Image (cartoon, rainbow, N blue to C red):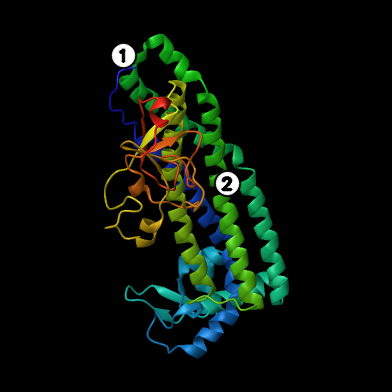
């Protein structure tokens, strides 16, 4: 087969955007379900934290104080939290059953959070203890977790659509490079061998990660609530509600990471299968050669630059053979240092072949040499 430079497709941006949009819908639904079913109980359970915050901080205007004691709700927010009409909220304020004496610069009536909590406690919980409130919280949480478990088939379908699109794009790129080298008949065989299995693996892995988003989200909310109620050394700057707010932000970031990372991994696994089908047992590692490349000595992470693999030098080649005593980190290794070095599909580095590390942008270029070239040793 004639030698030529081959660079596989990078991310399929349209598939990644679709996958990211679908995962983002899951995250928005998580937030909505938290607001509707869990937050009213969290407001009650965070009373102790608010009282502690009041003791620590000074009151300053509408914003009041930091932490759980800060929040003021508008009439619509209060109505939603209490599950009543906005007109009922105004009626309660007029009858002084719900305090609302503060207005913002737009003259919107603001109701202190502790008033909402107190009224909710009286009307819906009946003066229950923290332990009883926690039991209600746990029951609601269990129902929500079951609901998201039952959505797994939906997660699989959205993933399948994205992965099939990535598979098609990777094939078009591979065909452009190899069709004239190996012929259309062999191309058909190469495109089938092992690709179905790789597609199944990609769908399964991505679906599992999407399912883990609500699992992790609810688990961490539960840990925060239980820790806040019973103490046990639990603390979070800003209190329980700030913890859950920050948790929601990190959940959105994780969702975006999953979409991009799984798109790249799928593309890399499809490329590997096709190269192996062509008979390439080894490849040359290629990185993007920029400051974002893991291990770049001029990059931000100086520690990664210290992590290096050991190679056997053969002529002008540096060959990795899974040598003992090399970097064993499962996180990103030094991809900058791997540029131009020879690897075998049978012996992946600790963090995987090109494209398999978290958001790795490296790729495998087929090596056109033969094993006899590696018999010599300098």
> Would you place residue 366 above or below residue 192 in this image?
below
Is the residue marked by circle 2 packed among few (<14), some (14-19), or many (20+) residues within 10 Å? many
Q: Residue at x 26, y 49 (%)?
A: 290
Q: Which residue in the structure is indicated by mark 2?
A: 211
Q: Nearer the viewer, residue 297 or 103?
A: 297
Q: Residue at x 54, y 61 (%)?
A: 35
Q: Which residue in the structure is indicated by mark 1?
A: 180
Q: Left or right: 131 with respect to 152?
A: right
- N-terminal of the pair, mark 2 or mark 1, is 1
Q: Left or right: 123 with respect to 248?
A: right
**Which of the 4 image quarters holds residue 360?**
top left
Q: Nearer the viewer, residue 194 or 129?
A: 194
In this view of the protein, can residue 96 be seen by the observer? no
Q: Nearer the viewer, residue 363 or 113?
A: 363
Task: Residue 260 in the image: state x and y as whole percent.
Answer: 41, 44
Q: Determine the secondary structure under disc 1.
A: helix
Closest to the camera, between mark 2 and mark 1, is 1
> Would you place residue 78 above or below residue 93 in this image?
above
Task: Residue 259 in the image: state x and y as whole percent.
Answer: 44, 44
Question: Residue 85 bears which disc, if any?
Answer: none
Q: Residue at x 51, y 32 (%)?
A: 160
Q: Left or right: 190 with respect to 314?
A: right
Task: Residue 343 in the image: state x and y as whole percent.
Answer: 42, 37
In this view of the protein, can residue 132 be seen by the observer? yes
> Would you place residue 255 above or below residue 362 in this image?
below
Q: Residue at x 56, y 80 (%)?
A: 49
């Amino acid at each position: 087969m004639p030698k030529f430079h081959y660079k596989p497709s990078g991310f399929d941006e349209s598939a990644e955007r679709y996958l990211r949009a679908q995962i983002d819908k899951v995250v928005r639904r998580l937030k909505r379900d938290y607001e509707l079913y869990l937050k009213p109980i969290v407001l009650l359970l965070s009373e102790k934290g608010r009282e502690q915050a009041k003791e620590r901080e000074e009151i300053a205007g509408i914003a009041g104080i930091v932490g759980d004691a800060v929040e003021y709700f508008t009439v619509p927010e209060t109505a939603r939290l209490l599950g009543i009409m906005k007109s009922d909220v105004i009626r309660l304020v007029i009858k002084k059953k719900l305090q609302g004496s503060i207005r913002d610069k737009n003259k919107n009536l603001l109701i202190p959070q502790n008033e909402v909590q107190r009224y909710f406690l009286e009307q819906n919980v009946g003066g229950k203890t923290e332990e009883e409130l926690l039991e209600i919280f746990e029951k609601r949480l269990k129902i929500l977790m079951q609901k998201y478990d039952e959505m797994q088939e939906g997660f699989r379908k959205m993933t399948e659509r994205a992965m099939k699109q990535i598979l098609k794009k990777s094939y078009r790129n591979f065909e452009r490079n190899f069709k004239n080298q190996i012929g259309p008949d062999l191309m058909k065989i190469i495109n089938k061998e092992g690709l179905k299995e790789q597609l199944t693996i990609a769908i399964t892995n991505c679906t599992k990660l999407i399912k883990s988003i609500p699992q992790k989200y609810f688990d961490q909310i539960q840990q925060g609530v239980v820790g806040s109620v019973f103490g046990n050394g639990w603390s979070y700057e800003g209190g329980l509600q700030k913890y859950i707010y920050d948790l929601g932000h990190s959940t959105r970031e994780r969702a975006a990471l999953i979409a991009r990372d799984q798109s790249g991994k799928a593309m890399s696994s499809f490329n590997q299968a096709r190269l192996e089908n062509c008979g390439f047992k080894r490849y040359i590692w290629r990185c993007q050669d920029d400051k974002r490349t893991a291990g770049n000595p001029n990059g931000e992470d100086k520690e990664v630059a210290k992590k290096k693999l050991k190679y056997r030098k053969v002529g002008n080649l540096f060959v990795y053979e899974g040598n003992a005593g090399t970097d064993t980190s499962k996180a990103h290794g030094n991809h900058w240092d791997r540029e131009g070095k020879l690897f075998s599909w049978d012996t992946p580095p600790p963090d995987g072949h090109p494209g398999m590390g978290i958001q790795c942008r490296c790729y495998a270029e087929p090596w056109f040499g033969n094993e006899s070239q590696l018999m010599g040793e300098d």
